[in-house]
Amino acid sequence: FLGWSEGTTGHYEGRILSISGTTITTNTIKDMISGTDTGVNAVLVDTDKIVLLYKSTNKGTAAVVTISGTTVNTPGTPFEFEASSITSASDIAASALSSSSVLVSWRLSTAIKARILSIGVSTITAPTSAITINSTSATDKVTVGYVSASTAAVMYDVSGALKAVPVDVSGTTITGGAEVSIQSAACILPITGEGFVALNSSQLMAALCLASDNYPKGQVLTVNSSITASTAVSVSSNSAGSNGAFATTLVDSERVLYCYYRGGNLYGKVLKRA
């Protein structure tokens, strides 16, 4: 599934890409979210189901979209997970915990909130209320990483520096741990919330840029009841720009595909674990 905000209308559209060897075939485009809703995050929860997270009239909103073969169906009934006004769609991020559960996190003023969403066939509910992970310091983008069915991490911007909190998951109950500094220098997070990729049941790789050079970098975080961070490594010695246009995805247990935008072109590099 590939989704994007259409430049003329601002609608969120998507289509299925069929891949055979090195050949990609495109299928019919589906117009899914209209109006002024932009900056949508799409989270795969099953082979035939995704969850869209976005702001609608500035409220945090989610909807289920089912996939039938190569057809993207109309989103189900939207669910409002946050009734207060959210500044930007980049302040919302999520990660699937299972085929029926998603951890969503968002910034509300300077607070970082989180809650579990239960995913049905075409509907979404929230069994428990949102919790506050951090109440005082967040200033910008949020990203969420799944480590295991019981462990996740939330990373966010604090006046340019990066902070993260481990999140313990027990059924529909979540508990935030102690805040940890990931980068004290000014940083840039991906605009789409796709800043984490799980490497195994205890480690994530964070994608980021340091504002001092704008080089795309990767940094491994070990997550359990606390978080420890390795030294960030440059993916490229060329500036990726300051717009946060980069993302990662897991290829297999040893490799990560790191994509970034530079000079009007999209680049990709496969990273292999040492």
Image (cartoon, helix red, strand yellow):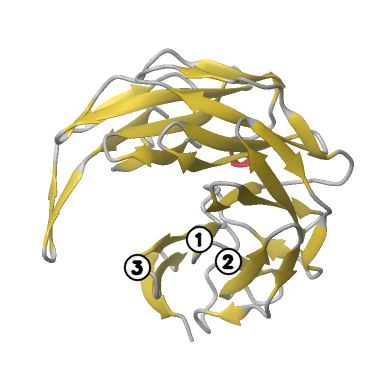
Label 1 vs label 2: CA separation? Answer: 6 Å
Residue 9 is labelled as none
Binning the other alpha carbons within 10 Å of mark 3 as few (below 14), some (14 to 19) or many (20 upward) gives: few
Q: Do the residues bearing badges 3 and 1 touch, measured as CB atoms within 8 Å?
A: no
Q: Is residue 49 above or below residue 24?
A: above
**Which residue shows up at 55% across the image and 58% down it?**
196
What's the distance in space between the residues labelled 2 and 3, CA to CA? 14 Å
Q: SS of the residue at dot 2?
A: strand
Residue drawn 59% across and 20% down? 126
Tell whether label 2 touches label 1 (CB within 8 Å): yes
Q: Which of 127 and 111 is in front in this view?
A: 127
For mark 3, what is the residue?
A: 252
* Residue at image location 89% in from the left, 41% down from the top: 136
Looking at the image, which is closer to me, 201 or 16? Answer: 201
The residue tagged 2 is: 203
Residue that carries the numbered disc 1 in the rendered image: 198
- Vertical placement of 126 versus 235: above or below? above
The image position of residue 209, as x and y in percent, is 62, 68
Q: Give neighbour class at mark 1: few <14, some 14-19, many 20+ (Cα, 10 Å).
A: many
Q: Is residue 38 visible?
A: no
